[in-house]
Amino acid sequence: MHRQTMPVAEPLNASAMTPPVVPEQEESGSIDSSGRIKVHLSPMGKDLSLTSQQAQKKGRDKDIDDSSLPDGVKDILKRIRDLKEQIQQKLMELQRIQASDKGSEAEKKQELERVQGELTSLNGALSSAHAMLNKVMDDIELDGDSRMEVADLLMK
């Protein structure tokens, strides 16, 4: 067996690689005092950097964001949508498990019980979110038109 030896590289001198701080860069905030480069994204750049799931969620909640409701109410409405979506996913998972012929009956039963437990937890969280929404609307004395807007957004 023939062994080749590789030359050992000298460690890099990190300070030699740090770019010098130019006064106008320091003022704009692109390089901090330790020489690290800072990147500032515009709102459009931040939107473009969203993952597809985040982008879908942002699009899904556009009607809530565009509403005239207070931010606290908007946040709860978004949370309710998240919970409803998670419940739908768990229901589909439950159906897949029931339709599956993989594994033993005991494994299938255990998996069904696990998903049913998760569904119970999600439904409890959904009930709590609805109760919180009602309390917040009462506390801020949301008017009738705004309550109708909330009801409309809840049905979507």
Image (spheres, helix red, strand yellow):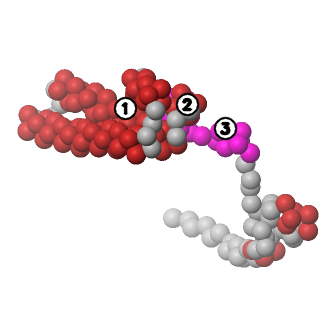
Q: Main secondary structure of the magenta part?
A: helix
State which tag comes first along the sequence, 3 or 1: 3
Residue found 17% across the figure and 27% down from its top: 98
Per the image, the residue denoted by label 1 is 85
Which residue is the site of mark 2?
Answer: 67
Q: Which amino acid, by three-letter code, is at mark 1?
A: Glu
Q: Report whether 98 appears left or right of 4.
A: left
Say whether disc 2 or disc 1 marks the residue closer to the N-terminus. Answer: 2
The 10 Å Cα crowd at callout 1, few under 14, some 14 to 19, many 20 or more, is few
Q: Residue at x 48, y 44 (%)?
A: 72
Q: Are marks 2 and 3 in contact (CB under 8 Å)?
A: no
Marks 2 and 1: CB-CB under 8 Å? no
Picture quadrant of residue 147: top left
Q: Is residue 45 magenta?
A: yes
In the foreground, 105 or 32: 32
Span of residues in magenta: 42-60
Q: Is residue 128 left or right of residue 78?
A: left
The image position of residue 117, as x and y in percent, is 18, 42
Task: Compare residues 21 and 42 and report the one nearer the observer.
Answer: 42
On the rendered image, what quadrant is the C terminus found in? top left
65 in relation to 10, above or below: above
Give amino acid for label 3. Leu
Name the N-terminal-most of marks 2 and 3: 3
Residue 61 at x, y = what percent? 51, 32
Quadrant of residue 67 within the rendered picture: top right
